[in-house]
Image (cartoon, grey):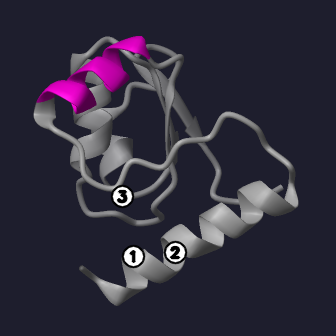
Amino acid sequence: RNIENIEYLQELKDLVSKLSIKDVQFQRSISDEMRSRLMRNALCVVYTPHLEHFGIVPIEAMYAGTPVIAVNSGGPKETVLDQQTGFLCDGNPE
């Protein structure tokens, strides 16, 4: 396991707790079948990496028919059709 991923998971868990968000499940390792089911049933997929060179997650989501909300940089600029297969947003945290 990547120590950076472990630390980030803990940060997310702490944030969920701090904000008192209910019904959050973190799945660290899921089967292909489970990933496909989650993608098909999701309202949307939020993809936040800035300047990601490609990113398979938006492709998987769009293949499942699920819209993608992504930062307008890197791979999503090439793969997500704004207002058609998803929405491209500025990387500004506001």
Q: Residue 76 placed where, x, y %? A: 36, 44
Query: Splitting the image into 4 quarters, where does residue 34 fall?
Result: top left
* Residue hosting label 1: 5
Q: Quadrant of residue 12?
A: bottom right
Q: Position of residue 9 (x, y in %)?
A: 51, 68
Q: Residue at x 41, y 13 (%)?
A: 41
Mark 2 or mark 3, which is nearer the start of the sequence?
Answer: 2
Q: Which residues are magenta?
A: 33-41
Q: Residues within 10 Å of mark 2 (few under 14, many from 20)?
A: few
Tag 2, which secondary structure? helix
| Cβ atoms at labels 2 and 1 below 8 Å apart | yes
Q: Nearer the viewer, residue 44 or 2?
A: 2
Helix, strand or loop at disc 1? Answer: helix
Label 3 sits on what residue type?
A: Gly
Is 7 included in the stretch rendered in magenta? no
Q: Which residue is mark 2?
A: 8
Label 3 and label 2: CA atoms lie apart by 22 Å
Instruction: Return the residue nearer the eye: 92 or 13.
Output: 13
Question: In which quadrant of the rendered view does residue 35 lie?
Answer: top left
Depth-wise, is mark 3 or mark 2 nearer the camera? 2
Residue 22: x, y in percent? 76, 37
